[in-house]
Amino acid sequence: MASLRSAARLRPLATRLTPQTSGRPRRLYATAAAVKTATSTSSGKQAFFPGEPAGPIVKTAIPGPESRKAIEDLHKVFDTRSLNMLANYSQSFGNYIADPDGNVLLDVYAQIASIPVGYNNPTLLDASATKQMVSAIINRPALGNFPSHDWASVLRTGILKVAPKGLGQVFTAMAGSDANETAYKAAFMYHRQQERGGAHVEFSEEDIASSMLNQAPGAPQLSILSFKTAFHGRLFGSLSTTRSKPIHKLDIPAFDWPQATFPLLKYPLEDHVEENKKAEADSLADVERLITTHHLPPCAVVIEPIQSEGGDNHASPAFFQGLRTLTKKHNVLMIVDEVQTGVGATGKFWAHDHWNLDTPPDMVTFSKKAQTAGYYFGNPDLRPNKPYRQFNTWMGDPARALLFRAIIEEIERLDLITNTAKVGDYLYAGIESLAKQYPGEFMNLRGKGQGTFIAFDSPRRDQFLKKAKSVGVNIGGSGERAVRLRPMLIFQQHHADILLEAMEKIANS
Amino acid sequence: MASLRSAARLRPLATRLTPQTSGRPRRLYATAAAVKTATSTSSGKQAFFPGEPAGPIVKTAIPGPESRKAIEDLHKVFDTRSLNMLANYSQSFGNYIADPDGNVLLDVYAQIASIPVGYNNPTLLDASATKQMVSAIINRPALGNFPSHDWASVLRTGILKVAPKGLGQVFTAMAGSDANETAYKAAFMYHRQQERGGAHVEFSEEDIASSMLNQAPGAPQLSILSFKTAFHGRLFGSLSTTRSKPIHKLDIPAFDWPQATFPLLKYPLEDHVEENKKAEADSLADVERLITTHHLPPCAVVIEPIQSEGGDNHASPAFFQGLRTLTKKHNVLMIVDEVQTGVGATGKFWAHDHWNLDTPPDMVTFSKKAQTAGYYFGNPDLRPNKPYRQFNTWMGDPARALLFRAIIEEIERLDLITNTAKVGDYLYAGIESLAKQYPGEFMNLRGKGQGTFIAFDSPRRDQFLKKAKSVGVNIGGSGERAVRLRPMLIFQQHHADILLEAMEKIANS
């Protein structure tokens, strides 16, 4: 057992079982946080999943010996250089992710913000065992050609049940990148239809011939406008709008599309009101300049409600209202990329619900926590004027659409949006007080009132994330120095306590 | 029952049950073909799935009244203009697809060539009910960061078990388009690494800064060379290499990448030996010209073994050998797009196995029948020199990788590649004799020795496809006038008989 003690800050915890281990008791080790939580949960707080571990268990350095062996083997057939932690999903439960060495971490990264209602969630387990799900797995349709007779019902009771206000239509896709790219395609087709004089006007011979040569006017000299430090995906079109980090973009050809300055707000917000207002005004001016002068006219602006991968950069509702006004004024579509912000993490189902827009965005893209993907839209003219223009073999995956439906049911059953808003406030207040105590460790705290979608800057970020594992927490980063918190929607106050205690330990170490 | 009789060419078939209907016998209608097959199957031929329908059942015009109602409803939330046939997958079995009106068609289109081993295949049904599958559905990992401890084993016993010779590595993706685009990205990164002097050479400051501006050299002025009438997907990068039809490309910005002439062979091949040889030589000359002179130097050539969407255009093994030689000579990568041709339909697991290349292609992309997707590669330098260069949140879907593993097991259990090669020869010979009888109806028959990957041109193609439904068969088209046959791998001689008889009826009508 000596090697187990090598992990710092561990002390023996009374003999207990992780929920999935069988009869034989084992002596386990846990962090102090875990000990405390085990107590606080037992003292009456209602956990969503009674079988969830009481707290993290850190038995070895991470990766431990079993993980190391498996990673070495995996590397022979799969690039493991970006591997963060080898997981054992059969031993993971709720907010906790397990590894092959018996470590069990509180997971506030959640598969890059894509697990909504916990590992091995019992409701999802039931949904995955239904005849309908099994059929969706083994009888995968080409949705555009041969949809199932119950596809309308699957959409209405799932994806469309949570459609953003005013956007009652959906085009389904596979993941965030193609959700964005198909939205971009819809925008280009819409724009050119308008230029032609309407959906009823036929393509010209020149359009047809030049499109086959990848030349204008058939392949038009138009663009999508995005923002500096934005992230919208990594395929060729989406990557052209991504401006997060060079490592995402280097050596990949890109469209010469414009990027507008994003308002980089200063924190705390209340101390920088005028500066921040000016930053947002400048950004909007930049958008208008690019819309009116760029050599490839933008037919849509794409924006994240909170720039996530790019460093958790926020802007005010007023900024987004201004952007909506500007896009309307110039007849440019507004695409809101809710791939990371959507499905509840900001304390509303869609982050753009925080803005109180007069008119909804033209399209909203989604993926990650939805486990499926696509874009919502409202204007019927965003359906292209002919069939087969927006089309591909699978056009999404009904199995994943069914899973999203079960996720939505679980969100409703446990009132998880309300939970996330409330726990987010609690967590934010906790970090705020940590930041007062350790001002050099928790900087530019942001995400107030945005559920658990919280981040701060750390002067030694990568070290911070590494240390987090040793104190039982799995945390992710974003941008150059942000620590981004992306708990699941089932993250509760007692989990927040564990996280806060763990972060204090890191600050102290 | 009067309305049922409105469908042409139907006659009553003795009272019988479809495999999924419950106790109550119903009087059904079937085509003459069905009657014959019911006899021939009962006369001793071994069906892979004894419960498969004995033949097609056509009860109504398609779409029938139930389908019409459902389609009208679906159209409110989902664009149905490209809908071919509303399906009822719970009533579909093996080679047969059912609809809500009780029609059951022999399906030789198979979800645009993407169903490998039949609807509701019992082996896949078992695989979809395993704990491993359920976990993969509900605990979806960000594969690059948090792979499961058994991911290496899932790869080795599945995707990598059928890796093309010499290509023992894989990068997993979601569908054909992103499989191709990630392969293109790998090609660009590889090319630029070589230009820099190797994987160990760091990016220059200029590379880094310009990449963030979508400008060269960081976003390089390089290209992927594809062929006229090729199809490689519909996202921005893949669509730039797609040259099948204007409807795929109109109004979407594209990279100014080059296209080479594809050798359009004349049939029957034996009557056009010299012409076809010249067409292939001209095409290779065009490739070499573009590689050496195009203003955006190609760093890879992408090609389908048989151009599928573009009209089922074939070329000889000698042509592909020549292309391999040329790409080697000019240090350009060769990417073989096996999205439609892969996984057995040509009578070999990979269509490029027919070519006997001296050295394998650099990358082979796959999807459709694999139900998962990605690209195979061999050269370790095709792993980019740093982590996070080829990366995205999900990087594929382990649930679909597990399904592919089960598909592979089923292919092995029933020896389906051999079956497909043999039945393909039988079917080809049958169409050949139809073509002699009806030379104006079955033109330019192609796909000899290519399993069931068979096509011919029809002077009234769209009508042909429409009529096929009324005689109990679901068939697809490709290009401008090709009828493309894409049966599943469980398509047997008695199915071929039904198909041949149905096609003769169409020719006669």
Image (tube, coloured by chain):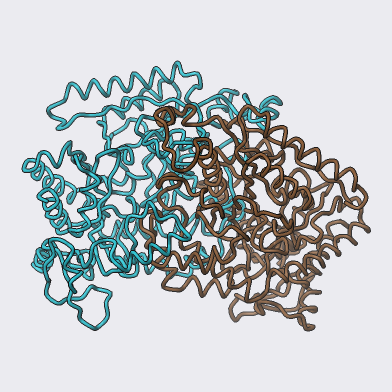
Chain colours: A cyan, B brown
Residue A84 lies left or right of residue A15; in this view the side is: right
* In this view, B498 is above or below A367: below
- Look at the picture and state if B255 lies above or below B398: above
Q: Is residue B463 visible?
A: no
Q: Position of residue A365 (x, y in %)?
A: 42, 42
* Residue depicted at x 72% and y 32%: B289
Residue at 25%, 66% (x, y): give it: A103
Location of the N terminus of chain A (image quadrant): bottom left
Question: In the rendered view, would you say B1 is above or below A234?
Answer: below
When asked about the image quadrant of residue B144, the answer is bottom left
Figure disc tally: 0
Asked if one can make out residue B109 in the rendered structure from this viewpoint, the answer is: yes
Q: Quadrant of residue A41?
A: bottom left
**Nearer to the camera, A441 or A66:** A66
Please name whichever residue, B180 or A40, is drawn nearer the observer in this view of the structure: B180
Residue sitting nearer the eye, A74 or A300: A74
Q: Nearer the viewer, residue B262 or A302?
A: B262
Instruction: Report x, y in % for residue B238.
Output: 58, 41
Looking at this rendering, what residue extends furthest in the left direction? Answer: A437
Q: Quadrant of residue B385?
A: top left
Q: Residue A479: percent from the left, percent from the top?
A: 30, 39
x, y (%) of residue A355? 28, 34
Q: Is residue A458 above or below residue B458?
A: above
